[in-house]
Image (spheres, grey):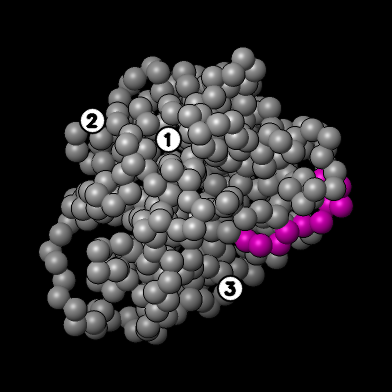
Amino acid sequence: MKRKAMILKLINITFFSFVTALTGCSNDSIEDQMVDNGEDKDTTEVVNLTYKEKAKETYDLIQELYKEGDLYKENYPAQANDNTYSYLWPYVGMLTAGNLLYELGYDESILEKEFEGLEKYYDNRSNLPTYQAEPVSEGSTDHYYDDSGIVAMELIDAYRLTDNQFYLDRAITITEFIMSGEDSRIGGGLYWFEGVSTDCTTDSNCIKAANTSAYAAYVTSELYKITEDPQYLTFAERVYKWTYDTLRDPSDNLYWNSIHINTEEINTRKWTYNAAMMIMSGINLYEISDEEFYLDQSIATARSAHSKFTSVINDRLFYETNDPWFNAELMTSFIELSEYDSKSKDYVEVFIRNADYAWENARTSEGQFYEDWSGNNRGRYYWLMHQAALVDVYARASLFKNE
């Protein structure tokens, strides 16, 4: 029914020449890109809630509208051909919500409830057990390397927050599955899902993808930090390099979506979350190795992501007005990078202003957020992931501002 759009590809200019050109670019400055640098002029009465409260209020609305037993509906209101329960991908948005709300000081039972529900997607098969696309009660479905990557990220965060060994053990288990998605065809990288990882030539899904590869590099670098197992670092370095060399557009240091196994045709679509995961992977590898080039590459991607993925709407600077969960990933990467790069703090503030505007101007009468936070396109709003993204953004805004 859905699935993250995939597909991208290559060229190669030097990193130095790109950074030189970028530093001279006048629209590097946020203020230069703003039509109106003053305070927001909309006259809508602002409800005086903290970001922490906004995150919880958004989470509570999801419980009211989307809850289906121990899991969630894919959409509210229901859309044609909806399954009983959501796919794994939007469910992961609720794992993020559980982790962040606990980090903000809400009861651990919220986190526990979300991770208990996750287990309904776990396929405990004898070889490479991992989570599948739908709950196992609904039948057997495929296993996606990117889905497992985002689940592993949340399991690792849950372990760090709670010190519960189960979360780390489960992350290690599914990382074995994630790592199995790499082979030597077209030089490396990870397939999109298990069903196309063998004997795949002509199908349009026979691809190696930026998201699967970048998630894999990030998860394994995270596990190396915890376990110091060298297999994780070797894997992370190799897959990061393949993604950088193969799917990076050297003209702007952003990442194409994927490359086809047989034709080597690149899907040149660029997504905010692919940039995000390469930024975060680069930060991890820099922190592990002290190799400056990883940090330089992350900063260059961040500069370009801010420039390419923003536009002026309603006299304000907005990040892309579609797929807000992808944007939330980019915001997270900017927060991580802000420890080393002051401009990234400014980029985070733009995200926060976008979320402020969305709270007042881009919600339905029931309180659901439109996909377009500028409020100009009052189209899609019903997908669970669109709502979960706002829990993520408000919670991270609260932590970023030390509320």
> Label 1 belongs to which residue?
154
Residue under the image location 54 percent in, 58 percent down: 272
Question: In this picture, which residue range is highlighted in magenta?
Answer: 261-270
Seen in the image, is 133 located left or right of residue 351? right
The picture places residue 334, in percent across and down from the top left corner, at 44, 54
Seen in the image, is 396 located left or right of residue 379? left
**Residue 339 in sight from this viewpoint:** no
What number is the disc on residue 24? 3
- When the figure is inspected, residue 341 is found, relative to residue 70, above or below; the finding is below
Q: Secondary structure at mark 1?
A: helix
The picture places residue 320, in percent across and down from the top left corner, at 48, 68
- What is the distance, in whole Å, between disc 2 and disc 1 at their CAs? 16 Å
Residue under the image location 71 percent in, 40 percent down: 191
Seen in the image, is 343 located left or right of residue 255? left
Which sits earlier in the primary sequence, circle 2 or circle 3? 3
Write down the quadrant of residue 235 in the picture: top right
Residue under the image location 84 percent in, 35 percent down: 199
Give neighbour class at mark 3: few <14, some 14-19, many 20+ (Cα, 10 Å). Answer: few
CB-based contact (under 8 Å), mark 3 and mark 1: no
